[in-house]
Image (spheres, rainbow, N blue to C red):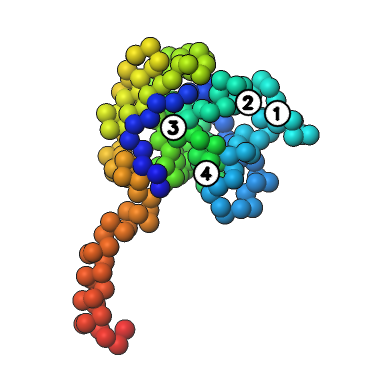
Amino acid sequence: MEKFTKMTGIAAPMPLVNIDTDMIIPKQFLKTIARTGLGKNLFDEMRYTQDGAEIAAFVLNQPAYRSAEILVAGDNFGCGSSREHAPWALLDFGIRCVISTSFADIFYNNCFKNGILPIVMPQEVVDVLMADARKGANARQTVDLEAQTVTTSDGQVFAFEVDSHRKHCLINGLDDIGLTLEKAVAIDSFEAKAAALRPWA
């Protein structure tokens, strides 16, 4: 998993509330177990017509936001079904951070396990970040996980809270497997002792 320490990038404004996982990646794209290739279908039904043409009004189709790495979203982002394909699609598009007033629990947990930082902020702060994001590609925001701050394009700094264990995992690029492998020496030692004590097992 790619490490997340500090990033500066384009923030796309998406003020819709209750964006569910089927809106993020519709069910017809869940046939794959690969984590790559889903970015082109991110927000598919909002992003394209039934004929496959881009909907110009959709934020990620606008020239200023095609390379967005941060999403400033409305309340209750990631609600609905528990599909892990939702963070896969966001990450494959290039989104590394989502900021909202609240997230669905399963989606929130899945983000950390896939290298995306979900940040919960009060409504008044999200409003400031949303307004800043609406300035376009030149209004880049900085997310500093180590300092736990988000800085707007004009220098306003807002602090956020994050669980220390999840912070450790993101900063070090550790998913569940990587976290287990941190204990490889202890695991190998235990297995060697167990084999010596119970060679028949």
Earlier-in-chain disc, 4 versus 3: 4
Residue that mark 3 sits on: 97
Residue that mark 4 sits on: 88
Q: Residue 140: in sight, yes or no?
A: yes
Callout in the foreground (1, 4):
1
Earlier-in-chain disc, 3 versus 2: 2
Asked whether disc 2 touches disc 1, contact meaning CB atoms under 8 Å apart, the reply is: yes
> Is the residue marked by circle 4 packed among few (<14), some (14-19), or many (20+) residues within 10 Å?
many
Earlier-in-chain disc, 2 versus 4: 2
Which of these two is toward me, 86 or 76? 86
Q: Report helix, strand or loop for mark 4.
A: helix
Image location (x, y in percent) of residue 69: 48, 30
Residue located farthest toward the bottom when viewing the structure as drawn? 200
Residue that mark 2 sits on: 61
Q: Quadrant of residue 110?
A: top left
Q: Residue 100: in sight, yes or no?
A: no
